[in-house]
Image (cartoon, rainbow, N blue to C red):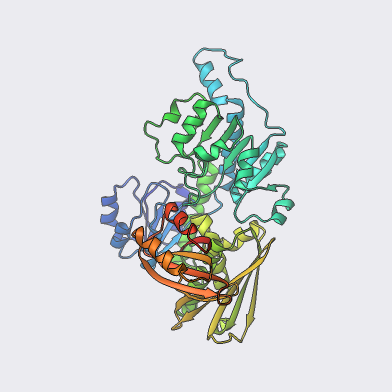
Amino acid sequence: MKVLVSDNISPKGVEILKKSGLEVDVKTGMKPEELKACIGEYSGLIIRSATKVTAEIIEAAKSLKVIGRAGSGLDNVDKVAASKKGIVVMNTPGGNTITTAEHSMAMLFAVARMIPQATASMKAGKWEKKKFMGVELFNKTLGIIGLGAIGSQVAKKAQGLEMNVVAYDPFLNEEKAQATGIRKASLDEIFAESDFITIHSPLTPETKGLINAATIAKMKNGVRIINCARGGIINEPDLYEAMKSGKVAAAALDVFEKEPPDNNPLLTLDNFICSPHLGASTEEAQENVALAVAEQIADYLVRGTIRHAVNFPSIPSDQVPRLQPYINLAEKLGSFACQIFEGGASEITVEYLGDAATINAAPVTIAAIKGYLSPILLETVNFVNAPFIAKERGIDIKESKRSDAGDFFSKIVLRIKTKERESYISGTLYSKKDPRVIEIDHFTVEIVPEGELLLIYNNDKPGVIGNIGNTLGKNNINIARMHFGRETAGGLAISVVSLDEKPGPGVINQLKGLPNILSIKQISL
C-alpha cells in the first residue's frame, strides 16, 4: 500500500512508514489540481496545515483509507465527506501541548516587558531605557479562556510565577478548579478582573469574534491580550482600535484570521507583538507529531488498529453493524444535552435499557461523551481522547444497564449532574437504526435529532404555536418539523422546531418577545 506525505514532516516519520512495509511518496507544495490528479493511487495521506483536503479531493481519492494530520487542527479536512466515504481521519492531539503553552508564556513575558520592541530599538542604534518601562507578572491576575491541555499547562506555569489565575471553560466544574488552585470564573469576570488575558479555545461559532469592541469595553484599562490558539477568535479591527486608544496596553498574536496577514493594521502598532503561527514550531513538537501520525497510519493500514480517529471509534469490524446505530444515537444525545443543559458537569451517567443493555457499551459511552464535548471543542475532541478530556475537566463518567426499557425495545439515557441540578435526556432507535430523542427531563417528546433546531420553553396557551410559525414565516425561515411536550394542560410546555436554516440573533430576539415564550435554546446537530 502507498502513503502520500503532502506536507513537510520529520524524516523519522517517513522511516517508520517504510519500516512497516508501506511505500511512501513525499510530494510537498502541490497545487490542489496536482493533488487531485495523483491522490487516487494512495491508501494513506499525511498532511499538516498547508494541504486542503476538500470534498473534491476526497471524491478523487478512490483508494484512500486514512488521512493523518501531524498536529491537532483539522479545519483543512472535509471530515463529513471523508466519513461518508469511510475514510478514517486521525490527528495527533497532545504532541504540541507543552510547546504551545511555552510559546504563550513567551508572549506573556514579551507583552509585559516589551522585549521585541526594545530589541528593535537597540538594533537601530538607540538606547531608549525610559520608553520601555514594563510591568511585573508577580501578583497580577491572568485570565485563561479555555482550560484544556494547553490552557492547563499555562495555568501551572503562571502559578509558578505567583500570578493569580482565573479561568473560564464551559466544562470546568468547581471541584476540578479548586483541586488545581484555579478560580473558576465567568467570561464577564475574566474580562473585568484580568490584567492579562490568554486564549486557549478552539474556533467555533460561539468563540468567533469573542474578543470584540463590546467585550474589550468590559476589560480593565491597560489589559494585555495573548492569542496562540486560533485566528478569528479576536476581532482584529476592534483590537486595533482598542490598542490605538490605549484601552489595551499591548497584545501578542501568534494566529490571525487570514494567514499570512495582508496589510493588517495591527502590524503598524508599536505595542503589538506577533509571530507567524509558531505555537507548535519546535523541533521536539514537530518530531513528536510526525512520529505519532506515522505510527497511527502504519497501525491502521498494516494492522487494522484505529487510534486518535476523530470520525470513527475503535471497535472490531464485526461489531460495526450492530453498534453503529447506538453510537450515532449516543453521540446525538450528548451533543443535544450539551446545548440545552447549562453549567459545568461534574458527572455524566449513561444508562442502557432493553436491547441496548446487551451491547458492548464502551464505544457507545465514548460516543456520548464525544457528543457532549464536541459542540464547544469541535476538532479538539475525538473518539480516543474524549474520556481523557472529560477527566481533565473533572467529569466523572458512569454506566448502568437494565433489561427493562418500558414501552421501548431499547433506550439510552444520559444523566447530567452539575452543582446546581441533575438533568436527563433519553433516546431510542426507530426501525433499529434511526435515532430519536424521546425524553427531555420530565417532558415526553419525539424529536428527529438532526440539523438546526430550536428548543422553546413556553406556557401551554393558545396561539403560541401560531405565533412561532408566523414569526419564522415572516423571516422566510421554513419549518421542517415541530415536536411538542407538556407537563399538564395549561402548564409548562416545550416546543422543538426543526428548521431548514439557522436563524440569526434578530429572529431569536423576535421569538423571545412573543407572548408566553419563556426561553429559547438553539441546537445544531
* Residue 97 to residue 363: above or below: above
Nearer-the-camera pick, 285 or 235: 235
Q: Going by the image, does 108 lie left or right of 309? A: right
Nearer-the-camera pick, 246 or 258: 246
* Residue 322 to residue 30: above or below: below
Q: Going by the image, does 296 lie left or right of 197? A: left
Determine the residue positioned at 44% across, 25% down. 268
Nearer-the-camera pick, 361 or 225: 225
Determine the residue positioned at 54% across, 37% down. 216
Q: Tell me how many marks there are.
A: 0
Residue 232: image location, x then y, percent: 45, 43
Nearer-the-camera pick, 329 or 490: 490
Q: Answer with the quarter of the image where residue 481 lies.
A: bottom left
Residue 191: image location, x then y, percent: 60, 40
Determine the residue positioned at 55% across, 44% down. 284
Looking at the figure, which quarter contains the N terminus? bottom left
Q: Is residue 227 visible?
A: no
Q: Is residue 93 visible?
A: yes
* Residue 22 to residue 315: above or below: above
Determine the residue positioned at 27% across, 51% down. 34
